């Protein structure tokens, strides 16, 4: 993707470029990063942060105010993660070296496990429409499409294209309703249908043929129309439900199930609160969330209470009220047993402590996020936290940062999430650049561009082209830099990012001058 990116950018191995870059960084770095590096320089070969961390005064907003659930042994945790990767690889190798009979048996079992009967799909689709509280007029439209499918599957030779088309039409109706309800674009039902189409569908209607691997789970009573219980942000997934992003930088998907509470009043308050939050009306959102908390206490719904505290924490976090955000995140942890929620909460807290340079505490939360993501079998969330930890060590000029990037990369390779792969490659590029290895940095930027292109993230593509161009400028290759900046300009235009586009245009004008 980076044309000519591997051409040697006229580098002399005398270290002068790295020294100059280090001097430039010293004049532009943030106070938090400067403090971090000053601490690191006092023990530059530290393994596991073996230095005295400066603790803020008692009146600071960021004093550590959480209780760790378990002490974190960082080296042991890293070994465990590496073991997970090795075990998965070993498992794959063992399967491929099995005897012919075992392979045939496994293949037959796999084929059976990946087969789903059309009757199960129709039942889950209908239950999904009921569970999210689809209005009657929309429900009738959905039922019309499902009736056409039902008619086809009764035939000896059903028209599979017609069946899939009607299911897609029905999914669009449900997604539009969810989007309007939450004031947020949703394609959770369509994504579920697409995932099912990748499996082997048995179009011979049989209600008794149930594949538990693809069975959609609903809250108790949620599929009973009379109880009017709704579930909106849970994707009826074939493998993993759709979810919110764990971080804006990566959009790494984590299977966090934000279930609408079963209590009708609590459900209404929760939905209203979310609408205000999405509409960027924080005061109204917080007021409604407070009412929702009171109702959650009345009905004894602790899991919903945890989700409310998490949402409140995000509002404070987004508006830079960090002390209040940490308090809400901690309360969310106190009221949940959901490892997915714990993953996101610890990640959010880690970012706060990272931003204010409480490194040990930030690493602690990142490790907890990795741990709970492991319990939830969430490889993307694990990769995101490990990459963040690598970035911390990179800022401290610690070579062990590449250990974390390597583990994150191994985990991400087992997913089809191009955004997390792009995030890892881009982070590694920044690390290589900081350590004075520009050609390795350019190689990683090239990979990041490819991954972000696959993920259809033009803004990230533009940023990585821009950063690669900076390397070419540092090493007196303006023609290559211009070519990369022109590509960055194109993708920044696609992303409609005016600030980034202006920055790129200024660099191009400087080159022309």
Image (tube, rainbow, N blue to C red):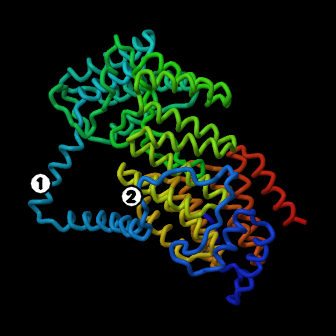
Give the label on residue 323, or none. none
Residue in view at x 84 percent, y 58 percent = 506
Give the label on residue 414, or none. 2
In the image: residue 88, left or right of residue 233: left
Quarter of the image with the C terminus is bottom right
Work out how far the residue at label 1 is from the one at label 2, CA to CA, in angstroms.
24 Å
Give the label on residue 105, or none. 1
Q: Secondary structure at mark 2?
A: loop
Q: Position of residue 187 (x, y in %)?
A: 48, 32
Of the two numbered discs 1 and 2 on the same chain, state the one appearing first in sequence. Answer: 1
| Residue nearest the observer in this picture, 50 or 499 | 50
Select label 1 or label 2 by which is in front: 2
Residue in view at x 33 percent, y 19 percent = 146
- Quarter of image, res 144: top left
Please tell me whether residue 245 is drawn above or below residue 430 in the rendered image.
above
Q: Position of residue 362 (x, y in %)?
A: 56, 59
Please tell me whether residue 413 is drawn above or below residue 332 in the rendered image.
below
Question: 10 Å neighbourhood of mark 2: few (<14), some, or many (≥20)?
Answer: few
- Quarter of image, res 256: top left
In the image: residue 333, left or right of residue 112: right
Q: Secondary structure at mark 1?
A: helix
On the question of residue 446 being in view, the answer is no
């Amino acid at each position: 993707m980076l044309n000519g990116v591997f051409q040697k950018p006229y580098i002399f191995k005398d270290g002068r470029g790295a020294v100059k870059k280090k001097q430039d960084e010293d004049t532009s770095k943030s106070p938090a990063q400067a403090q971090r590096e000053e601490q690191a320089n006092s023990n530059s070969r530290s393994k596991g942060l073996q230095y005295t961390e400066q603790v803020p005064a008692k009146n600071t907003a960021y004093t550590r105010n959480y209780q760790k659930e378990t002490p974190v042994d960082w080296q042991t945790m890293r070994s465990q993660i590496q073991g997970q990767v090795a075990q998965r690889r070993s498992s794959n190798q063992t399967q491929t070296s099995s005897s012919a009979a075992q392979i045939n048996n496994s293949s037959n079992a796999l084929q059976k496990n990946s087969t789903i009967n059309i009757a199960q799909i129709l039942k889950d689709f209908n239950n999904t429409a009921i569970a999210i509280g689809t209005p009657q007029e929309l429900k009738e439209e959905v039922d019309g499409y499902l009736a056409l499918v039902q008619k086809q599957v009764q035939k000896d030779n059903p028209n599979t294209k017609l069946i899939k088309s009607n299911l897609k039409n029905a999914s669009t109706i449900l997604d539009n309703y969810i989007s309007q309800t939450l004031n947020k674009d949703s394609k959770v039902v369509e994504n579920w249908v697409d995932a099912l189409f990748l499996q082997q569908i048995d179009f011979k209607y049989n209600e008794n043929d149930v594949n538990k691997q693809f069975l959609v789970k609903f809250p108790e009573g949620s599929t009973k129309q009379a109880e009017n219980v709704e579930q909106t942000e849970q994707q009826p997934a074939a493998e993993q439900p759709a979810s919110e992003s764990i971080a804006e930088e990566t959009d790494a998907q984590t299977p966090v199930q934000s279930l609408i509470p079963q209590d009708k009043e609590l459900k209404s308050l929760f939905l209203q609160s979310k609408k205000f939050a999405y509409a960027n009306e924080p005061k109204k959102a917080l007021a409604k969330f407070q009412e929702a908390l009171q109702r959650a206490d009345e009905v004894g719904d602790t899991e919903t209470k945890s989700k409310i505290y998490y949402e409140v924490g995000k509002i404070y976090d987004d508006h830079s009220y960090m002390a209040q955000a940490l308090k809400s995140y901690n309360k969310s942890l106190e009221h949940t047993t959901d490892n997915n929620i714990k993953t996101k909460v610890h990640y959010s807290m880690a970012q706060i402590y990272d931003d204010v340079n409480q490194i040990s505490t930030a690493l602690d939360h990142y490790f907890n996020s990795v741990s709970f993501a492991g319990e939830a079998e969430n490889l993307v969330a694990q990769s995101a936290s490990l990459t963040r930890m690598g970035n911390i060590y990179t800022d401290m000029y610690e070579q062990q940062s590449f250990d974390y990037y390597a583990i994150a990369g191994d985990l991400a390779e087992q997913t089809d999430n191009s955004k997390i792969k792009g995030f890892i490659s881009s982070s590694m590029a920044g690390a290589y650049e900081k350590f004075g290895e520009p050609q390795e940095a350019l190689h990683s930027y090239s990979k990041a561009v490819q991954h972000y292109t696959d993920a259809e993230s033009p803004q990230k593509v533009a940023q990585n082209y821009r950063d690669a161009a900076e390397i070419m400028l540092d090493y007196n290759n303006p023609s290559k830099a211009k070519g990369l900046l022109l590509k960055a300009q194109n993708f920044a235009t696609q992303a409609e990012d005016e600030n980034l586009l202006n920055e790129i245009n200024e660099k191009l004008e400087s080159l022309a001058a």
